[in-house]
Image: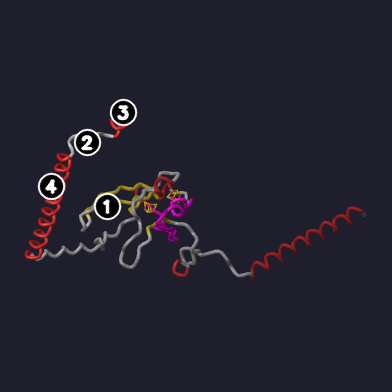
Amino acid sequence: MSSIKEYFSEAGKGLKSLVTGMAVTGKEFVTPKITECYPENRASLQIPDRFRAELTLKYDKEGHHKCIACGICQMNCPNGTIQLTTKMVDLPDGKKKRKLDKYMYDLGSCTFCMLCVTTCPQDALEFTNDFEQAVFTRGSLIKQLNYRPEPADDAPAPAPKPAMDPEKLAKIKAEALAKAAKIKAEKEAAAKAAAAGQAQEPNKPNDENKEN
Ligand code: SF4
Ligand code: SF4
């Protein structure tokens, strides 16, 4: 008798478990799907903006980036992922300036820690959310971030100073010479006067002799 009772008890538990499982399945059946059918839905795929896929330099509309080749990102990268080379260029005003030559980034060794982005003093870097980065060779993961042609330096060449009018220049020179001659003559006169004054009082005792 007890075995029959046990049998029905276990059958009841199994039925209850089955109903519970079917309830969970039924609920998930009507819940909106959150999985993505990639790559079929590539056109409508929504990747969060915060997703870090690839480091890039920020470019403005004119194709300028803000990197000043200071090397801080390279120094802060814990993996040696960033390699910069720089060059010295001549500016229109005759001065020299260090500029970025190549900004090489190895996506294969990047851990997406953001240290480079957060420490850049120029806010020149950002991460894109372009996650489709599959390639056939590791070398293809090394990318040059300053890939756009370098725009010409915007600093306009300083306008040459207009040459001074020759007559005006000659006048200024003559005035300067006259002024110098006058000062020299005054100095000579003062020296002569001082010498004449000393000649008139040859035996004037000094203060020490007076006291003695
Ligand atoms: S990206 Fe920023 S930190 Fe790196 S070299 Fe350029 S300016 Fe300096
Ligand atoms: S995110 Fe981190 S590992 Fe990647 S390049 Fe920047 S500093 Fe280096």
The reply to whether callout 1 and callout 4 are in contact (CB within 8 Å) is no
Which mark is in front, 4 or 3?
3
Magenta residues, dominant SS class: loop
Q: Specify the amino acid type for callout 3.
A: Asn
User: Which residue in the structure is indicated by mark 4?
Assistant: 188
The residue closer to the viewer here, 125 or 134, is 125
Most extreme residue toward the top is 212
- Nearest-to-viewer mark from 2 and 4: 2
On the rendered image, what quadrant is the N terminus found in? bottom right
**Disc number placed over residue 204 in the picture, else none:** 2
Q: State the residue at coordinates (82%, 61%).
A: 12
> Closer to us: mark 1 or mark 4?
4
Secondary structure type for disc 3: loop
Q: Position of residue 34 (x, y in %)?
A: 57, 66
Give the residue type that dot 2 points to.
Answer: Lys
Q: Quadrant of residue 68?
A: bottom left
> Which amino acid type corresponds to the residue marked 1 in the rendered image?
Lys
Q: Quadrant of residue 75?
A: top left
The residue positioned 46% from the left and 66% from the top of the image is: 40
Q: Indicate the position of residue 143 as horizontal and vertical percent values.
A: 35, 52
Residue that carries the numbered disc 3 in the rendered image: 212
Marks 2/4: CA–CA distance:
25 Å
The 10 Å Cα crowd at callout 3, few under 14, some 14 to 19, many 20 or more, is few
Residue bounds of the magenta highlight: 113-135
Is 114 placed left or right of 144 in the picture?
right
Q: Earlier in the sequence, mark 1 or mark 2?
A: 1
Q: Quadrant of the C terminus?
A: top left
